Image (spheres, grey):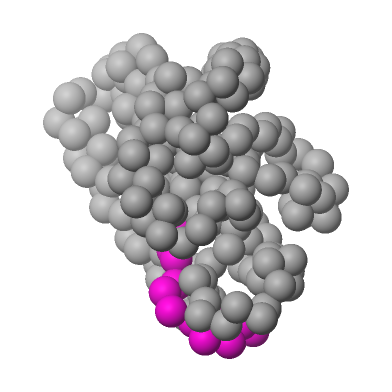
Amino acid sequence: MEKRAVIQELSLLLKDSKLRGRVLVSRGDDELERLAGWVCRQEQALENARDNDLKNIIDACSLCPGVVERKYGVGTGINGVMVILNSPQLVNTIERKMLKKESVEMLKKIIQAANLSFGECYITNMVKCDISDALVKPSQIVSNCEHILNREIEVIKPRVVIVFGDILPLQNTIKNSTEIIWYNIEHPITLIKNPELKRAAWSTIKLVMVKLKELNMQQV
């Protein structure tokens, strides 16, 4: 098992109050505290190295012309859940900016409704940059970003991925990720503009919760 996987498992065990006593309590609280501190330091170092690696890949990409802003993933991903956001195509840039704060809050509520910690998920965008060149087709932009998203999946190693927005552009990635369980929900902006779609979103979240419980991946 690679070093990062070992540290993640130790970290999860140390965070789980039900398992603490079974794992290290007989060795003494002082040792437990020292080990917990070591795991946190090692985990932070690995996360920083991982984030820098992924950030460098995004920064180095020059496939799309007229890059205005680059988008980087956030969250540790330690709970095994990745969230991929694919912005709705029928929403203009101004409207996206106006609804950004509200959509982020809705995303947090949806994740929390699944008994997941927002910070422990890895949250990324399908498209890694905003560009000024209107002549580039959206499908081409997605295609240009595919290698970066695949690298994120390779590094984060999620067990469950929730795609908010159109999932069709990800079919090749899904076919090559047979060990990952995929779910699809409308983008938060779409849900804000079309409240009648929230019922279907909630139905999917309940399916996610069942699977997370089956995999023992929910918060205690």
In the image, is 146 to the left or to the right of 118?
Answer: right
Q: Is residue 141 visible?
A: yes
Q: Is residue 122 above or below residue 220?
A: below
> Is residue 71 covered in magenta?
yes
Q: Residue at x 15, y 31 (%)?
A: 30
- The dominant secondary structure in magenta is loop
Q: Residue at x 26, y 52 (%)?
A: 41
Can you give x and y, in whole percent of width and height, for residue 160 in the image?
62, 35
Name above or below for residue 77 compared with residue 150: above
- Find the magenta span and give its range: 60-74
Q: Picture coordinates of residue 177 (x, y %)?
A: 77, 47
Residue 180 falls in which quadrant of the image?
top right
Q: Quadrant of the C terminus?
A: top left
Look at the picture and state if 57 lies above or below 6: below
Residue toward you, 171 or 195: 195
Left or right: 144, with 69 as reference point: right
Q: Position of residue 56 (x, y in %)?
A: 47, 78
Is residue 56 part of the magenta span, yes or no?
A: no
